[in-house]
Image (tube, helix red, strand yellow):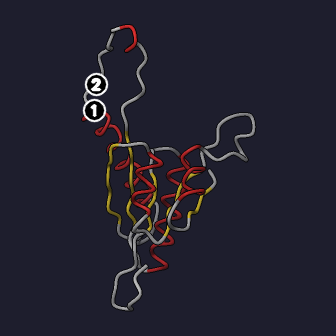
Amino acid sequence: MPQHMDEKPWPVVVGVDGSTGAQAALRWGLAQAKLTGSTVEAIAAWQYPEVYGYSYGWIPSMPEGGEFAKTAEHALLETVDTVRGQMDDPAQVSIRVAEGHPAQVLMDAARNAQLLVLGSRGHGTFSGILLGSVSQHCVQHAPCPVVVVPQP
């Protein structure tokens, strides 16, 4: 974190996937950034889905990577617009769409962050007490503090 008073605080990084949990995380991250005089870096990650069938010599047709990136960018922009529209004078937000596994993309961004903010997305019988796999990985391995915001 910056050590001199004239340096800008590092950003609050928020993982955004378009879910209601991501909206809650972004809302929390914007409020925290406002309190600390920082900004928010909202990040959406995308990756090619795993494809089965290669071992049989058949390669299914796949959309271009640009389609996955456009879908992620659309979800990111929609989430940012929705959440910022619900707040009075929110912190500034920069957006980034990155190719890669969401946990790795967020871990890379967290290297230069004061805080990493994620929504909880547990699945299964005890979904209320489970973290999603991305949140779990980041909580265990992030190079900065992590806040997991519960779903509303």
In which image quadrant can residue 7 be found?
Answer: bottom left
Above-or-below relation of 5 to 44: below
Query: What kind of residue is marked 2?
Result: Pro
Q: Report the residue at 39% width, 7% height from top.
A: 56
Give residue 32's position: percent from left, percent from top.
Answer: 51, 72
- Given residues 121 and 60, the one toward you in this image is 60
Q: Secondary structure at mark 2?
A: loop
Q: Evaluate if marks 1 and 2 touch, with contact meaning CB atoms under 8 Å apart.
A: yes
Neighbour tally class for label 2: few under 14, some 14-19, many 20 plus, Cα within 10 Å: few
Query: What kind of residue is marked 1?
Result: Glu
Total marks shown come to: 2
Above-or-below relation of 19 to 146: above
Q: Report the residue at 32% width, 49% height from top.
A: 97
In which image quadrant can residue 100 be found?
Answer: top left
Neighbour tally class for label 1: few under 14, some 14-19, many 20 plus, Cα within 10 Å: few
Give residue 39's position: percent from left, percent from top.
Answer: 38, 71
Give residue 66's position: percent from left, percent from top.
Answer: 24, 35
In which image quadrant can residue 33 be found?
Answer: bottom left
Give residue 113's position: percent from left, percent from top.
Answer: 43, 68
Above-or-below relation of 53 to 64: above
Residue 82 is marked as none
Which residue is label 1 attached to?
Answer: 67
Q: Secondary structure at mark 1?
A: helix
The N terminus lies in quadrant: bottom left
- Given residues 30 and 104, the one toward you in this image is 104
Q: Report the residue at 33% width, 90% height from top.
A: 6
Real-space Cα distance between discs 1 and 2? 6 Å
Instruction: Please state if 144 lies on the left or on the right of 94 as rendered.
Output: right
The residue sitting at the bottom extreme is 5
Residue 63 is marked as 2
